Image (cartoon, grey):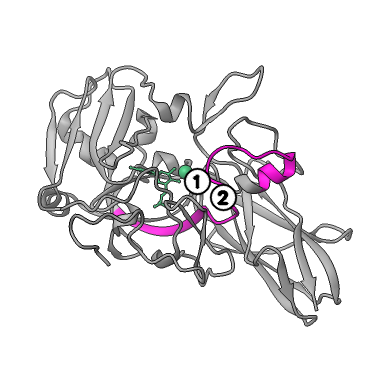
Amino acid sequence: MRTTPGIRTAVVKPTTADLMEDAGTGLDYGTRPDRLPGLLTPTDRFFVRNHAPTPCLDARSWTLRVEGGGVRRTVRYTYDDLWRRFPLVSVVRTLECAGNRRALFGAEHGHRFGGVQWGRGAVGTAEWTGIPLRDLLEPAGLTDAAVEVMPEGLDGARARRPMPLAKALASDTLLALAMNGEILPSDHGFPARVVVSGWLGAASIKWVGRIEVSDRPLRVPWNTDDYVLTAPGRPTVPITSTPVACLVELPWPARLSPVPQTIRGRAYAGEDRVTAVDYRIDDGPWRSAALDGPDLPGVWTRWRFPWSPDPGAHVVRVRATDEHGRSQPDATPWNDLGYCHNSVLPHPVLVA
Ligand SMILES: Nc1nc2c(c(=O)[nH]1)N[C@H]1C(S)=C(S)[C@@H](COP(=O)(O)O)O[C@H]1N2
Ligand SMILES: [Mo]
Protein backbone atom coordinates (compact mmCIF):
# COMPACT_ATOMS: atom_id res chain seq x y z
CA MET A 1 0.00 0.00 0.00
CA ARG A 2 1.11 3.55 -0.68
CA THR A 3 2.02 5.37 2.51
CA THR A 4 0.73 8.82 3.41
CA PRO A 5 2.50 11.45 1.28
CA GLY A 6 5.47 12.86 3.13
CA ILE A 7 5.90 9.77 5.30
CA ARG A 8 8.72 7.53 4.18
CA THR A 9 9.08 3.94 5.10
CA ALA A 10 12.20 2.11 4.00
CA VAL A 11 10.24 -0.61 2.19
CA VAL A 12 6.64 -0.10 1.14
CA LYS A 13 5.30 -3.63 0.74
CA PRO A 14 4.53 -5.81 3.76
CA THR A 15 7.57 -7.94 4.63
CA THR A 16 6.10 -10.52 6.97
CA ALA A 17 8.18 -13.42 8.25
CA ASP A 18 5.97 -16.05 6.60
CA LEU A 19 7.20 -14.91 3.16
CA MET A 20 10.43 -12.98 3.69
CA GLU A 21 13.60 -13.05 5.75
CA ASP A 22 14.61 -9.77 7.36
CA ALA A 23 18.29 -9.16 6.58
CA GLY A 24 18.45 -6.85 9.60
CA THR A 25 19.16 -3.52 7.88
CA GLY A 26 15.58 -2.22 7.70
CA LEU A 27 16.09 -1.95 3.93
CA ASP A 28 16.72 -5.47 2.74
CA TYR A 29 14.53 -8.56 2.75
CA GLY A 30 15.20 -11.98 1.23
CA THR A 31 12.69 -14.44 -0.17
CA ARG A 32 12.07 -17.48 2.03
CA PRO A 33 13.38 -20.40 -0.09
CA ASP A 34 10.58 -22.66 1.16
CA ARG A 35 7.89 -20.26 -0.10
CA LEU A 36 8.31 -20.55 -3.87
CA PRO A 37 5.07 -21.77 -5.41
CA GLY A 38 5.89 -21.80 -9.14
CA LEU A 39 8.52 -20.76 -11.66
CA LEU A 40 8.06 -17.07 -10.90
CA THR A 41 8.70 -15.52 -7.51
CA PRO A 42 5.43 -13.79 -6.62
CA THR A 43 5.95 -10.06 -6.22
CA ASP A 44 4.76 -10.12 -2.59
CA ARG A 45 7.83 -12.13 -1.64
CA PHE A 46 10.40 -11.05 -4.25
CA PHE A 47 13.59 -9.98 -2.42
CA VAL A 48 14.22 -6.27 -1.90
CA ARG A 49 17.71 -4.76 -1.90
CA ASN A 50 17.64 -1.04 -1.18
CA HIS A 51 20.65 1.18 -0.51
CA ALA A 52 18.25 3.94 0.57
CA PRO A 53 14.53 3.94 1.40
CA THR A 54 12.12 3.20 -1.43
CA PRO A 55 11.27 6.60 -2.97
CA CYS A 56 7.60 7.13 -3.76
CA LEU A 57 7.80 8.81 -7.17
CA ASP A 58 4.93 10.44 -9.03
CA ALA A 59 4.66 9.11 -12.59
CA ARG A 60 2.94 12.34 -13.72
CA SER A 61 5.98 14.48 -13.03
CA TRP A 62 8.64 11.79 -13.62
CA THR A 63 10.81 12.01 -16.73
CA LEU A 64 13.61 9.92 -18.16
CA ARG A 65 16.54 11.70 -19.79
CA VAL A 66 18.95 10.02 -22.22
CA GLU A 67 22.11 12.04 -22.71
CA GLY A 68 25.90 12.00 -22.79
CA GLY A 69 28.96 12.12 -25.02
CA GLY A 70 27.88 9.00 -26.95
CA VAL A 71 24.61 10.40 -28.34
CA ARG A 72 23.86 13.22 -30.81
CA ARG A 73 21.07 14.78 -28.76
CA THR A 74 19.47 14.63 -25.33
CA VAL A 75 16.01 13.08 -25.34
CA ARG A 76 13.44 13.18 -22.59
CA TYR A 77 10.53 10.78 -22.13
CA THR A 78 7.48 11.06 -19.94
CA TYR A 79 5.86 7.99 -18.40
CA ASP A 80 3.09 8.34 -20.94
CA ASP A 81 5.60 8.41 -23.82
CA LEU A 82 7.01 5.09 -22.72
CA TRP A 83 3.64 3.33 -22.79
CA ARG A 84 2.47 4.96 -26.05
CA ARG A 85 5.50 5.26 -28.27
CA PHE A 86 7.23 1.92 -27.90
CA PRO A 87 6.27 -1.73 -28.40
CA LEU A 88 6.52 -3.62 -25.12
CA VAL A 89 8.27 -6.95 -24.71
CA SER A 90 8.15 -9.43 -21.83
CA VAL A 91 10.98 -11.64 -20.64
CA VAL A 92 11.29 -14.00 -17.70
CA ARG A 93 14.65 -13.44 -16.00
CA THR A 94 16.30 -14.33 -12.71
CA LEU A 95 17.84 -11.53 -10.66
CA GLU A 96 20.42 -12.33 -8.01
CA CYS A 97 22.20 -9.95 -5.67
CA ALA A 98 25.99 -10.42 -5.86
CA GLY A 99 25.95 -10.53 -2.05
CA ASN A 100 23.49 -13.43 -1.88
CA ARG A 101 24.59 -16.05 0.69
CA ARG A 102 27.22 -13.72 2.20
CA ALA A 103 26.43 -14.99 5.72
CA LEU A 104 27.18 -18.54 4.51
CA PHE A 105 30.38 -17.33 2.82
CA GLY A 106 31.38 -15.86 6.18
CA ALA A 107 30.62 -19.13 7.97
CA GLU A 108 32.73 -21.01 5.40
CA HIS A 109 35.77 -18.82 6.12
CA GLY A 110 35.17 -18.12 9.84
CA HIS A 111 34.86 -14.42 9.04
CA ARG A 112 32.16 -11.77 9.11
CA PHE A 113 32.18 -9.88 5.81
CA GLY A 114 30.93 -6.31 5.72
CA GLY A 115 27.65 -5.66 3.93
CA VAL A 116 24.21 -7.23 4.10
CA GLN A 117 24.29 -10.61 5.86
CA TRP A 118 22.20 -12.42 3.27
CA GLY A 119 21.14 -16.01 3.65
CA ARG A 120 19.96 -17.76 0.49
CA GLY A 121 17.06 -15.48 -0.39
CA ALA A 122 18.54 -12.61 -2.43
CA VAL A 123 17.51 -14.19 -5.72
CA GLY A 124 14.21 -14.27 -7.57
CA THR A 125 12.64 -14.74 -10.98
CA ALA A 126 9.98 -12.49 -12.48
CA GLU A 127 8.38 -11.73 -15.80
CA TRP A 128 9.58 -8.25 -16.68
CA THR A 129 7.64 -6.20 -19.22
CA GLY A 130 9.08 -3.09 -20.75
CA ILE A 131 11.02 -1.51 -23.56
CA PRO A 132 14.32 -2.83 -24.88
CA LEU A 133 16.88 -0.24 -23.83
CA ARG A 134 18.14 -0.04 -27.42
CA ASP A 135 14.75 1.28 -28.57
CA LEU A 136 15.02 4.11 -26.02
CA LEU A 137 18.60 4.96 -26.96
CA GLU A 138 17.96 4.99 -30.71
CA PRO A 139 16.06 8.35 -30.88
CA ALA A 140 19.03 9.99 -29.12
CA GLY A 141 21.28 8.98 -32.02
CA LEU A 142 24.12 6.73 -30.85
CA THR A 143 27.47 7.85 -32.23
CA ASP A 144 30.49 5.69 -33.10
CA ALA A 145 32.10 7.06 -29.96
CA ALA A 146 29.53 5.47 -27.60
CA VAL A 147 31.16 2.91 -25.29
CA GLU A 148 29.13 2.56 -22.09
CA VAL A 149 25.56 3.02 -20.92
CA MET A 150 24.83 3.97 -17.32
CA PRO A 151 21.34 4.15 -15.83
CA GLU A 152 21.03 6.30 -12.72
CA GLY A 153 18.49 5.99 -9.91
CA LEU A 154 16.45 8.75 -8.30
CA ASP A 155 16.70 7.21 -4.83
CA GLY A 156 18.75 8.63 -1.98
CA ALA A 157 21.66 6.40 -3.02
CA ARG A 158 21.70 7.84 -6.57
CA ALA A 159 22.59 4.32 -7.60
CA ARG A 160 24.38 3.93 -10.93
CA ARG A 161 26.30 1.20 -12.67
CA PRO A 162 27.65 1.28 -16.21
CA MET A 163 27.55 -1.54 -18.73
CA PRO A 164 29.30 -1.88 -22.08
CA LEU A 165 27.30 -0.68 -25.09
CA ALA A 166 26.92 -4.27 -26.39
CA LYS A 167 25.15 -5.37 -23.20
CA ALA A 168 22.89 -2.32 -23.29
CA LEU A 169 21.89 -3.16 -26.87
CA ALA A 170 21.09 -6.83 -26.14
CA SER A 171 17.46 -7.70 -26.89
CA ASP A 172 16.87 -8.74 -23.25
CA THR A 173 18.24 -5.60 -21.60
CA LEU A 174 15.06 -3.73 -20.74
CA LEU A 175 13.64 -0.71 -19.09
CA ALA A 176 10.88 -2.55 -17.20
CA LEU A 177 7.54 -0.92 -16.45
CA ALA A 178 5.81 -4.01 -15.12
CA MET A 179 6.68 -7.08 -13.08
CA ASN A 180 4.70 -10.33 -13.11
CA GLY A 181 1.93 -8.68 -15.13
CA GLU A 182 1.39 -5.69 -12.85
CA ILE A 183 2.65 -2.13 -12.81
CA LEU A 184 6.11 -2.15 -11.24
CA PRO A 185 5.71 -1.87 -7.45
CA SER A 186 7.48 1.00 -5.65
CA ASP A 187 10.00 -1.27 -3.96
CA HIS A 188 11.07 -2.79 -7.27
CA GLY A 189 11.63 0.51 -9.04
CA PHE A 190 8.38 2.30 -9.99
CA PRO A 191 7.98 3.97 -12.40
CA ALA A 192 10.80 2.26 -14.33
CA ARG A 193 13.80 0.04 -13.67
CA VAL A 194 16.47 -1.49 -15.80
CA VAL A 195 16.75 -5.28 -16.07
CA VAL A 196 20.24 -6.39 -17.13
CA SER A 197 19.71 -10.08 -17.84
CA GLY A 198 22.08 -12.49 -16.13
CA TRP A 199 24.12 -9.80 -14.43
CA LEU A 200 24.41 -9.11 -10.73
CA GLY A 201 21.30 -7.41 -9.34
CA ALA A 202 23.15 -4.13 -8.77
CA ALA A 203 23.26 -3.48 -12.52
CA SER A 204 19.46 -3.51 -12.66
CA ILE A 205 18.99 0.07 -11.49
CA LYS A 206 15.59 0.90 -9.97
CA TRP A 207 13.77 4.25 -10.10
CA VAL A 208 15.71 5.28 -13.21
CA GLY A 209 15.66 9.00 -14.04
CA ARG A 210 18.61 9.30 -16.36
CA ILE A 211 20.59 7.15 -18.73
CA GLU A 212 24.04 8.33 -19.66
CA VAL A 213 25.62 7.09 -22.88
CA SER A 214 29.31 7.83 -22.49
CA ASP A 215 32.16 8.13 -24.95
CA ARG A 216 34.64 6.78 -22.38
CA PRO A 217 34.69 4.11 -19.67
CA LEU A 218 32.92 5.35 -16.56
CA ARG A 219 34.23 4.91 -13.05
CA VAL A 220 31.64 5.13 -10.29
CA PRO A 221 31.53 3.66 -6.77
CA TRP A 222 29.58 0.59 -7.94
CA ASN A 223 32.33 -0.52 -10.33
CA THR A 224 35.38 0.67 -8.42
CA ASP A 225 34.74 0.04 -4.70
CA ASP A 226 31.53 -1.94 -4.48
CA TYR A 227 30.28 -4.83 -6.60
CA VAL A 228 33.84 -5.75 -7.53
CA LEU A 229 35.84 -8.90 -6.85
CA THR A 230 38.89 -7.84 -4.94
CA ALA A 231 41.49 -9.96 -3.14
CA PRO A 232 45.08 -9.40 -2.00
CA GLY A 233 47.54 -9.61 -4.88
CA ARG A 234 44.86 -9.81 -7.55
CA PRO A 235 43.49 -7.13 -9.88
CA THR A 236 40.07 -5.80 -8.94
CA VAL A 237 37.34 -6.75 -11.40
CA PRO A 238 33.78 -5.43 -11.57
CA ILE A 239 31.22 -8.24 -11.27
CA THR A 240 29.07 -8.85 -14.35
CA SER A 241 27.42 -12.26 -14.94
CA THR A 242 26.93 -14.22 -11.69
CA PRO A 243 28.24 -17.79 -11.21
CA VAL A 244 26.32 -21.09 -11.30
CA ALA A 245 24.49 -21.84 -8.04
CA CYS A 246 21.37 -23.49 -6.75
CA LEU A 247 18.70 -23.08 -4.14
CA VAL A 248 17.10 -25.90 -2.16
CA GLU A 249 13.46 -25.19 -1.37
CA LEU A 250 13.81 -26.07 2.30
CA PRO A 251 14.33 -23.97 5.42
CA TRP A 252 17.84 -24.00 6.90
CA PRO A 253 18.01 -26.21 8.91
CA ALA A 254 15.12 -28.32 7.58
CA ARG A 255 12.87 -30.77 9.43
CA LEU A 256 11.26 -33.56 7.43
CA SER A 257 9.15 -36.61 8.18
CA PRO A 258 10.55 -40.10 7.46
CA VAL A 259 8.30 -40.67 4.43
CA PRO A 260 8.98 -40.85 0.67
CA GLN A 261 9.00 -37.31 -0.70
CA THR A 262 10.33 -35.02 -3.40
CA ILE A 263 13.06 -32.48 -2.70
CA ARG A 264 12.87 -29.49 -5.02
CA GLY A 265 14.85 -26.44 -5.92
CA ARG A 266 16.13 -24.13 -8.61
CA ALA A 267 19.51 -23.71 -10.29
CA TYR A 268 20.77 -20.68 -12.18
CA ALA A 269 23.94 -19.57 -13.92
CA GLY A 270 23.99 -15.82 -14.59
CA GLU A 271 23.73 -15.23 -18.35
CA ASP A 272 24.11 -18.93 -19.07
CA ARG A 273 22.05 -22.09 -19.02
CA VAL A 274 22.11 -24.80 -16.35
CA THR A 275 22.77 -28.22 -17.89
CA ALA A 276 22.92 -30.57 -14.87
CA VAL A 277 22.04 -30.74 -11.19
CA ASP A 278 23.45 -33.51 -8.96
CA TYR A 279 22.68 -34.32 -5.36
CA ARG A 280 24.24 -36.32 -2.59
CA ILE A 281 22.77 -37.55 0.69
CA ASP A 282 25.31 -37.76 3.54
CA ASP A 283 28.34 -39.72 2.28
CA GLY A 284 26.39 -41.46 -0.49
CA PRO A 285 27.13 -41.25 -4.22
CA TRP A 286 26.33 -38.23 -6.36
CA ARG A 287 23.18 -38.81 -8.41
CA SER A 288 21.41 -36.79 -11.08
CA ALA A 289 18.37 -34.71 -10.17
CA ALA A 290 15.58 -34.38 -12.76
CA LEU A 291 15.46 -31.00 -14.52
CA ASP A 292 12.02 -29.51 -15.10
CA GLY A 293 13.10 -26.49 -17.11
CA PRO A 294 12.48 -23.96 -18.49
CA ASP A 295 16.10 -24.46 -19.68
CA LEU A 296 16.69 -20.87 -20.80
CA PRO A 297 19.78 -18.69 -20.35
CA GLY A 298 19.37 -16.18 -17.53
CA VAL A 299 16.41 -18.01 -15.99
CA TRP A 300 16.55 -20.44 -13.11
CA THR A 301 15.63 -23.99 -13.92
CA ARG A 302 13.60 -26.17 -11.57
CA TRP A 303 14.97 -29.52 -10.38
CA ARG A 304 13.80 -32.35 -8.12
CA PHE A 305 14.79 -35.70 -6.72
CA PRO A 306 12.98 -38.36 -4.72
CA TRP A 307 14.07 -39.17 -1.17
CA SER A 308 12.85 -41.65 1.43
CA PRO A 309 14.88 -40.52 4.42
CA ASP A 310 15.58 -42.55 7.55
CA PRO A 311 15.06 -40.81 10.87
CA GLY A 312 18.10 -38.92 12.11
CA ALA A 313 20.36 -36.04 11.14
CA HIS A 314 21.32 -35.80 7.46
CA VAL A 315 23.26 -33.51 5.18
CA VAL A 316 21.95 -32.88 1.66
CA ARG A 317 24.24 -31.43 -0.99
CA VAL A 318 23.15 -30.17 -4.40
CA ARG A 319 25.52 -29.07 -7.16
CA ALA A 320 24.60 -27.40 -10.43
CA THR A 321 26.67 -27.27 -13.63
CA ASP A 322 26.39 -24.69 -16.39
CA GLU A 323 26.62 -25.03 -20.17
CA HIS A 324 30.37 -24.34 -20.07
CA GLY A 325 30.92 -27.28 -17.73
CA ARG A 326 31.50 -25.08 -14.69
CA SER A 327 30.17 -26.67 -11.49
CA GLN A 328 29.66 -25.21 -8.05
CA PRO A 329 32.92 -25.56 -6.06
CA ASP A 330 33.30 -27.15 -2.62
CA ALA A 331 34.67 -23.80 -1.39
CA THR A 332 34.40 -20.33 -2.92
CA PRO A 333 37.73 -18.56 -3.37
CA TRP A 334 38.08 -15.62 -1.01
CA ASN A 335 37.20 -12.10 -2.07
CA ASP A 336 37.32 -9.21 0.36
CA LEU A 337 33.70 -8.10 0.00
CA GLY A 338 32.12 -11.55 0.16
CA TYR A 339 30.45 -11.60 -3.25
CA CYS A 340 29.45 -14.40 -5.61
CA HIS A 341 29.41 -17.21 -3.06
CA ASN A 342 28.44 -20.39 -4.88
CA SER A 343 29.90 -23.29 -2.90
CA VAL A 344 27.96 -26.52 -2.61
CA LEU A 345 26.12 -26.07 0.69
CA PRO A 346 25.89 -28.81 3.34
CA HIS A 347 22.15 -28.47 3.98
CA PRO A 348 21.30 -29.72 7.48
CA VAL A 349 18.12 -31.84 7.55
CA LEU A 350 16.65 -33.42 10.67
CA VAL A 351 14.29 -36.30 9.91
CA ALA A 352 11.92 -37.23 12.71
N1 LIG B 1 18.28 2.88 -7.61
C1 LIG B 1 18.64 1.72 -7.06
N2 LIG B 1 18.68 0.62 -7.84
C2 LIG B 1 19.05 -0.55 -7.33
C3 LIG B 1 19.42 -0.68 -5.98
C4 LIG B 1 19.35 0.49 -5.17
O1 LIG B 1 19.62 0.47 -3.97
N3 LIG B 1 18.96 1.66 -5.75
N4 LIG B 1 19.86 -1.89 -5.49
C5 LIG B 1 20.44 -2.79 -6.51
C6 LIG B 1 20.74 -4.10 -6.01
S1 LIG B 1 22.20 -4.24 -5.17
C7 LIG B 1 19.98 -5.20 -6.32
S2 LIG B 1 20.46 -6.74 -5.87
C8 LIG B 1 18.70 -5.05 -7.04
C9 LIG B 1 17.57 -5.65 -6.25
O2 LIG B 1 16.37 -5.52 -6.92
P1 LIG B 1 15.01 -5.75 -6.14
O3 LIG B 1 15.01 -4.93 -4.90
O4 LIG B 1 13.91 -5.42 -7.09
O5 LIG B 1 14.96 -7.23 -5.79
O6 LIG B 1 18.39 -3.71 -7.33
C10 LIG B 1 19.51 -2.92 -7.70
N5 LIG B 1 19.05 -1.64 -8.14
MO1 LIG C 1 22.65 -6.48 -4.88
Q: Residue 46: in sight, yes or no?
A: yes
Q: Secondary structure at mark 1?
A: loop
**Few, some or many C-alpha atoms within 10 Å of disc 1 (few <14, some 14-19, many ≥20)?**
many
Locate residue 150: give its quadrant.
Answer: top left
Q: Quadrant of the C terminus?
A: bottom right
Q: Quadrant of residue 281?
A: bottom right
- Residue 315 in the figure: left or right of residue 55: right
Dot 1 beta carbon under 8 Å from ligand 2? yes
Query: Mark 1 sits on what residue?
Result: 97
State which region is magenta: 104-129
Kind of residue at badge 1? Cys
Please say whether residue 198 is visible from this viewpoint. no
User: Residue 49 placed where, x, y %?
Assistant: 43, 49
Q: How many numbered badges does the structure rendering display?
A: 2
Q: Is residue 136 above or below residue 123?
A: above
Label 2: few (<14), some (14–19) or many (≥20) C-alpha neighbours in 10 Å:
many
What amino acid does circle 2 point to? Trp
**From the viewer's perspective, is residue 214 above or below residue 102?**
above
Q: Is 113 positioned to the left or the right of 318 in the image? A: left
Label 1 with label 2: CB-CB less than 8 Å: yes
Say which element carries label 2.
loop
Q: CA distance from mark 1 to mark 2?
A: 9 Å
Residue at (34% x, 34% y) in the render: 160
Percent x, y of residue 135: 23, 41
Residue at 20 percent of width and 51 percent of height: 57
Q: Earlier in the sequence, mark 1 or mark 2?
A: 1
Q: Position of residue 315 (x, y in %)?
A: 80, 61
Residue, disc 2: 118
